[in-house]
Amino acid sequence: MAIAALAVTALSIVSPLGRAEAAADPVLAYGARIAGDDARTRIVIDMDREPAFSVHYLDNPVRVVVDLPATAFGFPAADLKPIGLFKDIRYGTMDQDSARIVLTATKPVKLVMAKVQADENGKGHRLVLDAEMLPAAQFAELVKQQSWTNDDTAKDVGPVVPMEKPDSGIFLVAVDAGHGGIDTGATASDGVTQEKEITLAYAKLLADRLNAQPGIKAFLTRDKDEYLSLSQRVTIARQNHASLFISLHADTLKQKDIRGATVYTISDKASDKLASEVADRENNSDQLAGAETQAQPAAVADILMDLTRRETQAFSISLAQDVLTSFNGQIAMINNPHRHAGFRVLQAPDVPSILLELGFLSNKEDEKLLLDPDWRQKLVGQLTNAVKQYRASIVANGG
Ligand SMILES: [Zn+2]
C-alpha cells in the first residue's frame, strides 16, 4: 500500500458506509473499549466475525495503523475516546474493500499484542491491541524495518517485535530511584533535601556496585531528575526483561519516632496500617504530578492480576528475606521489617519486585544517616550482598 494512500485525516470519525458503494458484506464492529495509562493501553473491538488485519507504524506524529477488510463501525465514538498512550483515534472506510484504524500516540509505542480471538460465548470475535511505550530509537527501528506489502495477514501482524532478551547468563537488576521531576517525594527537615535526590544517589551507587559483580548487570529506570509514572517504571523493567526490580524510597511518617529500613512486597491486603498508609502515599505519586490516572476497568484489572503469577510473588518474598538477612545487625530496621501492601510500582507480573524504604526522613537519626555518604556505602554494600545471595540461590535451584 502506498504511503500516499494515508489521507487519514480526511476520514470521518465514524463513517457509516454509504449503502451504494459498501462492500457486499462488511465486518460489523459492534463494540469497543479502551483502558490503560501512559505506559500501557489496551483497545478491544468486538466484531461479528474474524477479520484479517495488518499493523503498521508511522512517525511524525507516532501512529499505529491497523488495516482491516471492509468494516462497518457501529459502536458509539465515545467508547473509543483516546486515553493513555493515544491522543487521537480515527477509524473508517478506505475503499470498498478496506477500512482502517489510525491511533495517534503521545509517545513512541509498539503493539506487544495484536490478535483476533473468539469470544467466550462463541458469538463473535475480538480484535485486541495492546500498546506499550517504547524508547524512541527502537520505534525508529520499528518504522524502518516494516514493509508495506499487501500480503500481511492476521497470522503475520507485521512488526510486532519483542524486545531483545539479555544474555541468558546475565542477571539483570532494574534499580528504581523513587519519585523524580515534579514528584519530589518527601522533604528532609532542612526543608531543602528531597527524597527524589536521596533515592537517585542510592540508586546510582547500587547500580554501580551491582555492575561491578560478575554475572550481574544493573540499569536505572531514571538516571536524572525526571518524572516517571509508576506504570512507566514497571514497563521499563518488564521491557528490559529484568530479573529483579528494586524501588528505593525514604519517606516521612507522622510518627517521628519510627525509624529504620523496611522492605515491602506487593499484596492485595496491607500487612498493617503503616504499610497501607505508605502504599497510599506512594500510589498517589501520579496524581500529585498531574499525570493521567484512571481506575482500570474490572476486566483489564483482572487480566493484570491473572498474570501476577504466584511464582513471581514467591521470588519477591525470597528477595525481601535476603535483604533482611543481609541488613541484620548492620542496618537499623523497624519492627516487623518485612511488610506488604498494594504498591502499584510492584505490580510487574513477571519481575520479582521489592520496595525498600531506606529509612525515614521524618526521623532525626535516620535523616542524618540517609544524608551520610559513608552510611550510603554501607547500606548499598549490604543490599548488593543481598542481591548476590538471591542470585546464588536462584542459580543453585536451577532457575
Ligand atoms: Zn517515596
Image: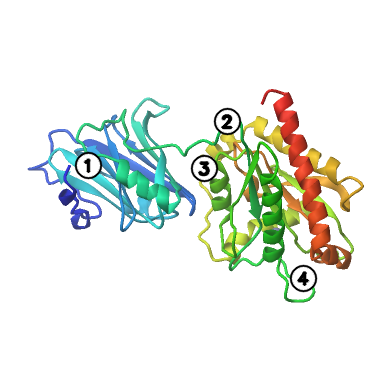
367 sits to left or right of 341: right
Can residue 272 be seen here? The reply is no
Callout 4 secondary element: loop
Task: Name the amino acid, label 1.
Answer: Ala
Q: Which residue corresponds to mark 2?
A: 168
Q: Residue at x 32, y 34 (%)?
A: 157
Figure quarter occupied by ligand 1: bottom right
Residue 37, placed above or below residue 114? below
Q: Which residue corresponds to mark 1?
A: 72
Label 2 or label 1, whichever comes before in sequence order: 1
Residue 262, placed above or below residue 320? below
Task: Name the amino acid, label 2.
Answer: Ser
Label 2 or label 3, whichever comes before in sequence order: 2
Q: Position of residue 303 (x, y in %)?
A: 53, 37
Q: Residue at x 21, y 31 (%)?
A: 151
Q: Which mark is residue 239?
A: 3
Q: Residue at x 61, y 63 (%)?
A: 180
Callout 1 secondary element: strand
Q: Which residue corresponds to mark 4?
A: 188
The CA span between labels 2 and 1 is 47 Å
Task: Name the amino acid, label 4.
Answer: Ala
- Furthest-right residue in view? 329
The CA span between labels 3 and 1 is 35 Å
